[in-house]
Amino acid sequence: MLPQIESLLVIQDRDHQIQTLQNELEKIPRDAANIKNRLSEAQADYDLAKEHIQQNELAVKKIDLDRKTRKDTIEKLTVQQFETKKNDEYTALGAEIIRYQDMVDALETQELEYMEKSDDLTTALSTAEKKLTSIKEGMADEVKALTEKKNNHSARIAELSQERSILVKDIDEATLVMYDRVFKKKGNAAVCPLHENQCGGCHMKVISDTVSRTIQEKELSQCENCGCFLYSV
């Protein structure tokens, strides 16, 4: 294998590692945002569950107040009924008492329904609170892990970049420029094996002259389709 090909393969290995680490670094802000979103959603669920309980409690208090008001009215009507001496007025007051008692019965039914609903709302609040607490407790560890990952990846990229800067000194400028151009274009490789008469990068057939030059290993050869530097396997 040509020394330049060997050097380019080593450089390509470093570029692959750098590329992988950089891709991981690009994900970190999104991962951090996802953590914050989970916390925001959990907080919103908790606040909503708490609001539902408060609304339910207010509804029960209002019903209780309305029920007491109507019971007071019933007591007053009952007193008036016993004090009246007119039959038609007595009957009318009795009808009003029944109407108000029906209101009281309906309000008591509603109150029971709200009180039963309270149990479900309390359970929902407890569930939301546990989820929120769990996310808050795990958030610190997740953020810490992301910070460590960012620092470690950044440090490793710096090391690999330093190694690369030393390795490229063995490559002539024109070859390095071509390598960088092809690697950037393909996004993953610029030095590929030749499989019989097929480029290992684009998987297209290359001309016989390219095959011959690659096998003889006397000079650098490139795929005329994608530009990859080729080596014989």
Image: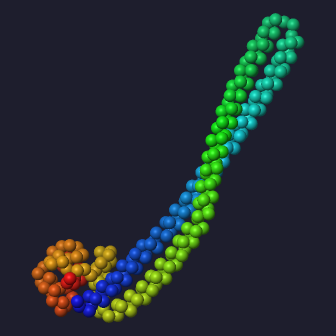
Q: Give the vertical position of 220 relative to 106 (above or below).
A: below
Instruction: Pick whichever, 153 or 40, lies toward us.
Output: 153
Q: Give the vertical position of 18 relative to 216 (above or below).
A: above
Residue at 66%, 45% in the rendered image: 122
Residue 193: x and y in percent read 23, 80
Residue 230: x and y in percent read 22, 82
Rendered image quadrant of residue 145 = bottom right
Q: Is residue 218 left or right of residue 162?
A: left
Residue 194: x and y in percent read 19, 80
Rendered image quadrant of residue 83 = top right
Residue at 67%, 30% in the rendered image: 110
Residue at 86%, 10% in the rendered image: 84
Q: Is residue 52 visible?
A: no
The quadrant of the picture occupied by the C terminus is bottom left
Q: In this view, does 200 lie to the left or right of 113?
A: left
Q: How is the image coloured?
A: rainbow
The quadrant of the picture occupied by the N terminus is bottom left
Residue 151: x and y in percent read 52, 78
Residue at the extreme top of the image, as rendered: 87
Q: In this view, does 82 lie to the left or right of 178?
A: right
Q: Give the vertical position of 35 relative to 11 (above or below).
A: above
Residue at the extreme right of the image, as rendered: 83
